[in-house]
Image: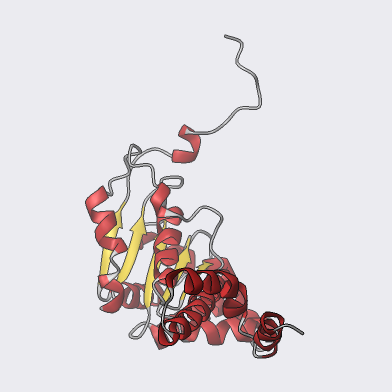
Amino acid sequence: MEKKQLIQSYCRQFKMGGLGAGLDQILIEAESNSISYLEYTLNLFKAEVVHREANDVQKRLKSARLPHFHDLNTFDYSFENGLSKTRLNQLRELDWLDQIYNIVMMGPSGIGKSFLAAGLCADAVNKGYRAYFRTMEEIINMLKMKDYTATAMADYKRLNKANLIVIDDIMLFPVEKLQAVALFNFINQIYEQTSFIVTTNKAPSEWAIMLNDEVLATALLDRLLYHSEVINLTGKSYRLKNRKTIFVSEN
């Protein structure tokens, strides 16, 4: 076996995929630039580090369960929803996340709440934070099933260690009392160590109706609004404005 093949074999044995994949290019650069042994060794380790960091980001993005559209670099600033480019860029700096602040996005359906929340979640993942995107229904189902399935328990443990949790469409539908209490207990135990982004089309006064419990709604709002920035989004639905038709234009 020639030396390069032997190195590739060792890379597979020690699970160093980045070094193995970048070996040819590193050898070419070393030969053409006559670099030192130290520089050559450093480049080998750099290739492995870059490879592992990229794999780690992909794993965390998968675990975050982001919706398909979540890249804020594609945000359409011509669509007016009340959030300026300056403020969005400030949010993307994630200083509020380091300060364990919450973001509450309120407004009617279709104006970009979920897209903005998912985009900020993606930004957090890419910067090394443990960030997850879940609908309220997914969180309630997880809390309901965590004592019965390993998958739900694993997600429960994952969210308990999160730096950021997006709760999308909170209070979109009425919640039964036991589920509402479970949701409150979950948020109550982590709200001082975890930031939340909450999207909702319901005013705080309507939360009591969804929960059928004014005291519980007040307690839940108290936790989420503690150290929070409330962003009221306005305007007409982006989806309706940009909807497509199946019919060919007759003009």
Residue 176 can be seen in this image? no
Whole-percent x, y for residue 65 in the image: 56, 67
Question: In percent of the image, x 38 and y 42: which residue is there?
Answer: 76
Whole-percent x, y for residue 67 in the image: 55, 58
Give whichever of 72, 16 is nearer the camera: 16
Question: In percent of the image, x 45 and y 56: which residue is there?
Answer: 114
Q: Which residue is at the far right?
A: 1
Q: Which residue is at the far top?
A: 251
Give whichever of 244, 31 is nearer the camera: 31
**Could you say which quadrant of the image residue 153 lies in?**
bottom right
146 sits to left or right of 77: right
Whole-percent x, y for residue 100 in the image: 30, 78
**Could you say which quadrant of the image residue 246 lies in?**
top right
Question: In percent of the image, x 35 and y 58: which residue is there?
Answer: 105
Q: Is residue 101 above or below residue 200?
A: below
Residue 123 can be seen in this image? yes
145 sits to left or right of 47: right
Quadrant location, the N terminus: bottom right
